[in-house]
Amino acid sequence: GENVEQHPSTLSVQEGDSAVIKCTYSDSASNYFPWYKQELGKGPQLIIDIRSNVGEKKDQRIAVTLNKTAKHFSLHITETQPEDSAVYFCAATYSGYSTLTFGKGTMLLVSP
Amino acid sequence: GAGVSQSPSNKVTEKGKDVELRCDPISGHTALYWYRQSLGQGLEFLIYFQGNSAPDKSGLPSDRFSAERTGGSVSTLTIQRTQQEDSAVYLCASSLDRSGYTFGSGTRLTVV
């Protein structure tokens, strides 16, 4: 089955800096890669996703890049703000399968 | 409803007791998922429902765990003879297709 590795496990940045979280996956058939943000006491919330027919997707301050050859994808957050502090999870699946496989999460701390 | 609703939000139970966790998905969402999140860990897949059937229950950790879904809507996850290692946050998600999960806020289960 699919295996997703996520790094780093924790990331501390100063407000205004950029943050990058990286994930690798094992199953070359995977073609859907969402990112979730989980705030304390809440369930994960989808923030951005990318499908394997594109290499990059942006939504305001967040972007995701995908390298199918290397089987890795990354989340980029620019101009970080304290409210970006949360745990971020990457995930992967392929359209013929129904469940997402998640990475172990990255705790992002943005200091004012 | 507007989101995925889970109840109870917190549950403390004695070792050996049975517990039932409830998930009310977004109206019209045909797919429903249960995940488990242990402290500091990622999201561990438990079971997936499409309508009332469970085509993938491969993640259930033991025969003490079972789940059902009725009317293509509400789902109940039952843990029999709870053990301390069952302590975790149990998350439910629903989706209209095989992407775009919407998670509930979870049930925090503590077995004492």
Image: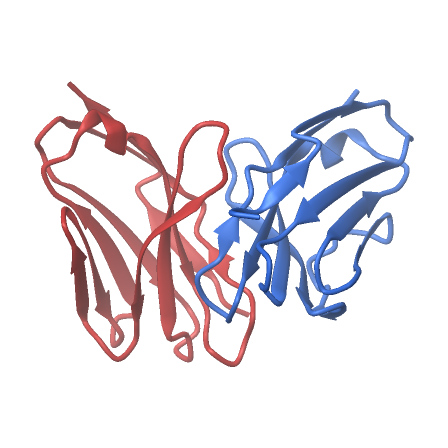
Chain colours: A red, B blue
The foreground one among A23 and B92 is B92
Q: Left or right: B24 with respect to B15?
A: left
State the residue at coordinates (47%, 62%): A3
- Position in image of residue B105 (x %, y %): 55, 37
Compared to residue A51, the image places residue B108 above or below, namely above
Relative to B53, A46 lies left or right? left
Residue at image point 36% right, 59% down: A34
Q: Is A28 positioned to the left or the right of B88 in the image? A: left
- Write down the quadrant of residue B6 in the picture: top right
Question: How many marks do you count on the picture?
Answer: 0
Residue A85, how many percent across, how many down?
Answer: 29, 30
Residue found 51% across the figure and 47% down from its top: B2
Outermost residue to the front: B1
Please tell me which residue is depicted at 56% across the width and 43% down the height of the picture.
B104
Expressed as whole percent of the image width and height from the top left, the position of residue A47 reads 32, 50
Q: Quadrant of the C terminus of chain B?
A: top right
Q: From this view, report whether residue B24 is shown above or below residue B37.
A: below
- Picture quadrant where residue A39 is located: top left
Quick one: B50 or A53, which is closer to the camera?
A: B50
Q: Which x, y percent locates residue B45?
A: 61, 55
- Of residue B63 and residue B1, the one placed in the foreground of this image is B1
Res. A71 image quadrant: bottom left
